[in-house]
Image: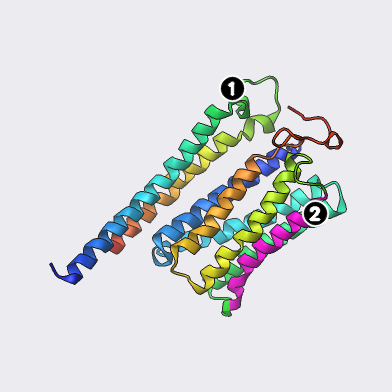
Amino acid sequence: MSTQLIQERVAARSRTARARIIAALGPLTMLGGVAWAFLQPYRLTILHPHGEGFWWLFVQPPLLVIAVGVVFSLLIAPGLIEDLEAEEG
Amino acid sequence: MQPPAEHVHWMFATGFLLLGLLLLARAVVGEEVWRRRTWRAYLWPSLLFGLGVLMWPVMVFFTNSTIHLVAHGMWAQTMMVGGAAELGLLRGKLHNRAWQLAVPLALAVSGASLLIHEQNGWLFARAAFLHHIMGWTALVGAIFPLVAIVRPRSRVWGSGLALTLVVLAVFLYADRDVAPIFGHLSPLAGEPHR
């Protein structure tokens, strides 16, 4: 097997690994938010609402973390993976 | 109808977390792939600039002492300068490579502001602890973008800034208005809210 072919294969594997990392960033962030919600359920006002105002219902940290993961997964990751694959091709 | 101060910290934490993820993705794929779509290249500097802009109302409405006000004003300015410098470099309006120093300087000055404006010791209350640890994190974290200027292709230095921002986000999420830290809470800090 030629050195060039080996180098190409190593590079392709590395690119695939990069695509996997990008694809995993959003779900991992969401998982972090879910895990946090289980560890500190009192940070979620929605689980025990007692007449709290707007801000207590709008800003719930574990949900914000999950939202960041969703935004990244839906808006950033697909295009980035597509561009990575285009670079491969 | 102002949000409580701790909610403001959590909203900024969300901004930093998103910023960290964007920079981490950029470090993973490399600058060339990241810039393939123009909007994506502008995303993180715009977010940084936007966070700086949003810090001004925080400075106006949420600070209760001069030193607190100056610190928030400093964070607003450094984030805006960092974001604007990166936008200027991207757009080609700024040519001098020295502008790349804006982000590490912003981080270092922000860290110094955090440390200088905190008047209490580490275990006074959770907020004091977070100010100290965030200050040192930002100061040490400034090394990553600084070294990344001379080693732009290095994933380690590139992702260092991203992870610094993620850590800062975690610290900001941990903030409460009055809360103990490792079981310590000075009686001078006031009554814990929850």
Is residue B147 or residue A73 the one in the foreground? B147
Q: Position of residue B26 (x, y in %)?
A: 45, 59
Q: Position of residue B87 (x, y in %)?
A: 57, 67
Residue linked to disc 2: B117
Q: Which portion, as a residue range, is magenta?
A: B98-119
- Residue type, label 1: Leu
Subunit under mark 2: B
Whether residue B59 sits left or right of residue A26 in the image: it is right
Q: Quadrant of residue B81?
A: bottom right
Residue linked to disc 1: A47
Residue drawn at point x = 67 percent, y = 30 percent: A56
- Residue type, label 2: His
Is residue B42 or residue B10 the one in the foreground? B10
Residue drawn at point x = 49 percent, y = 58 percent: B159
Whether residue B148 sits left or right of residue B67 in the image: it is left
Q: Quadrant of the N terminus of chain B?
A: top right
Residue A23 magenta: no
Is residue A70 or residue B23 the one in the foreground? B23
Q: Position of residue B28 (x, y in %)?
A: 41, 58
Q: Nearer the viewer, mark 2 or mark 1?
A: 2
Element under disc 1: helix
Q: Quadrant of residue A50?
A: top right
Subunit under mark 1: A
Residue B73 appears in the figure:
yes
Q: Residues within 10 Å of mark 1 (few under 14, many from 20)?
A: few
The CA span between labels 2 and 1 is 36 Å
Which is the main secondary structure of the residues drawn in magenta? helix
Residue B80 appears in the figure:
no
Whether residue A87 sits left or right of residue B79 in the image: it is left
Q: What label does residue B95 carry, if any?
A: none
